[in-house]
Structure formats: C-alpha cells, structure tokens
Amino acid sequence: MPYFDQTSRFLDQLDLVSIVDILLVTLVFFALMLLLRGTQVINLVRGSLLFVGAVLIASNLFELRAFSYMLRQALPILLVAIPVIFQPEIRRLLDQLGRAGSLSNFRNRTTAHEPIVDAITRACLVLSEKRYGGLIVIERLIGLQEYVDTGISLDSEISPQMLIQIFYKDAPLHDGAAILRGDRIAAAACVLPLSNDPTMTGRQLGLRHRASKGITETSDAVAIVVSEETGIITVVQDGLMIRRLDEKRLRHVLNAFYQPRTTTLWQKIKTRITGKESN
C-alpha cells in the first residue's frame, strides 16, 4: 500500500542529521505543550492534534484524495487562524524568551526576600483585622507591564505602611491590585483579567478572588487576597487557592513562592499546608 511504501522510503533515507532534525522538532512541540499546560486551551490543543493525526493517517491509508485536497487548501487558513486563537499563549512564550536571562536575576534577588515577605505578611494581617479588602500581585518571570500600565505608577519601597495605605477603604487606590516588581511597588489600582471559572460562587469569592485567579492563570505571578467580607487571607498560584492562612502559614507560603517556580514545589506546599485545595 502507498502508506507502507512511503514509510519504507522514509526509513531508508533516515540518517543522523534527520534524527537530530526530528528531535529538534519534538523539543519545540514539547516546549509549546509545557507553555500551554495549565491553561484553558490545552484540551483544545490535544483534541486538535488527535483529530488532525487521525485524519492524516486515514487519508493516507485509504487514499482519501478529495479529503486530502481539502486539508491542503485549508492549511493556509489554519496558519492564519492559529496565531489569532492562541495569541495570549504566543505572547506569553515570546515574553519568556525575551526574559531568558531573567531567571538568574530572579535567583539573585530571592536571597534578600525576607524583608519583602515580612512587609507583605504584616500588611495582610492588619488588612485582615480591619476588614480592608486587598489584592497584592507579585511579578515573577513573566512580565506584567500591560497590567501595570492600567494602574497608577508608584515605584515605591515595599513596606507594611505603604501597602495598608493603598488598601485603606477610603483611599483612591484601594480598588484594583497592587503589583510588586522586585523590591518595589510598581503600581496600584491595576486592572486584572477575571477568571471565567464557573466554580467560583458565593459571597466569599468576589471580584478580587476572580482577578487573582485570572492573573495567575495567565502568568506565573503569585497573588495574595484579603477578603473585605471575612478578612480571610488567600494565596493564589496557577489558579489554585490556599485559603484561611494565619501568619505562620502565610510566611511559609510566600517564602516558598519567592523561590524559582516549579510544579513540584507548588504540589509540596499545597500538600504540606492544606493537604488539598482549600475551600
């Protein structure tokens, strides 16, 4: 059959350069899958790949000439549609590539993160006690400049007093998020994307929680939310929430998240602190 004849010719032409070429293509697709992992489009990508693979195999096995012709004609349209559909993920990839050297910078600045963790913790405890709602976002490897631009630029030192003043209920900056970059407060009153997660219901999970989940679903940022209704402190990463944190657990979580990001670290924290995702 033509399919097996083509396979035989391919194996005959296979050499070291071809193997390296195939491995490079595999690594590119693997990197893209890692980038999309944890996003809402991963299931769409998997389904599309399975569908396209099945169609290509079937068209070659059974000589579906008309169907193969239609696929060839549709390819240019797909090449235009894919960047449009996956624009957020492509932008995220380019941002990560542009920050290739930022990992070492991030590692260097984590050695002096204790004062920052202390300032955030003390501020959150006061906000919780006084029932002042707060949303603090820590920028990590993926830049948040587009969200910084939606707020009021501050470029101020991170201190408990400054964070409390930002989220004071009558302050002009209390609505929106404060974004921390390194050891500075980059901006306040920033507008963040809201999560579309249908499971986020109830009075305890308002706009701040939706925004914290939204920003951590689209970046590697860490968000800290203080509920205005209950005073509950929540830390969010990758769209997953650890809620009802006291001072000791909040410090522990923040110290862990100021280390370079790994999935195993998040799983370790989630299991050690709560045993499961808190409600």
Image (cartoon, grey):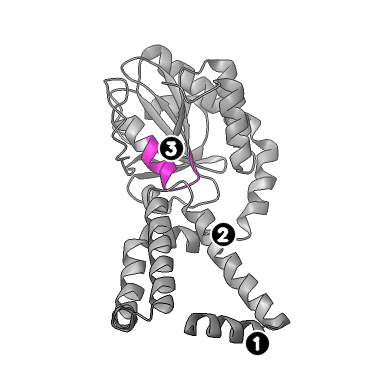
Please tell me whether mark 1 sits on a helix, a strand or a loop: helix
Badge 3 or badge 1: first in the primary sequence: 1
Picture quadrant of residue 136: top left
- Is residue 145 part of the magenta span, yes or no? no
Q: Which residue is mark 1?
A: 13
Q: Which residue is mark 3?
A: 239
- Identity, as a three-letter code, of the amino acid under mark 1: Gln
Badge 2 or badge 3: first in the primary sequence: 2
Could you tell me how far apart the alpha carbons at marks 3 and 1 are, in whole angstroms? Answer: 47 Å
| Image coords of residue 1 (percent x, y) | 49, 83
Label 1 or label 2, whichever lies nearer to me, is: 1
Segment tinted magenta in the rendering:
212-222
Q: Which residue is mark 2?
A: 99
Badge 1 or badge 2: first in the primary sequence: 1
- Is residue 220 part of the magenta span, yes or no? yes
Residue drawn at point x = 41 percent, y = 27 percent = 225
| Image coords of residue 40 (percent x, y) | 38, 48
Residue drawn at point x = 39 percent, y = 31 percent = 135
Left or right of 85 in this view: 53: right
Q: Is residue 32 above or below residue 131?
A: below
Q: Is residue 174 visible?
A: no
Please tell me whether mark 2 sits on a helix, a strand or a loop: loop
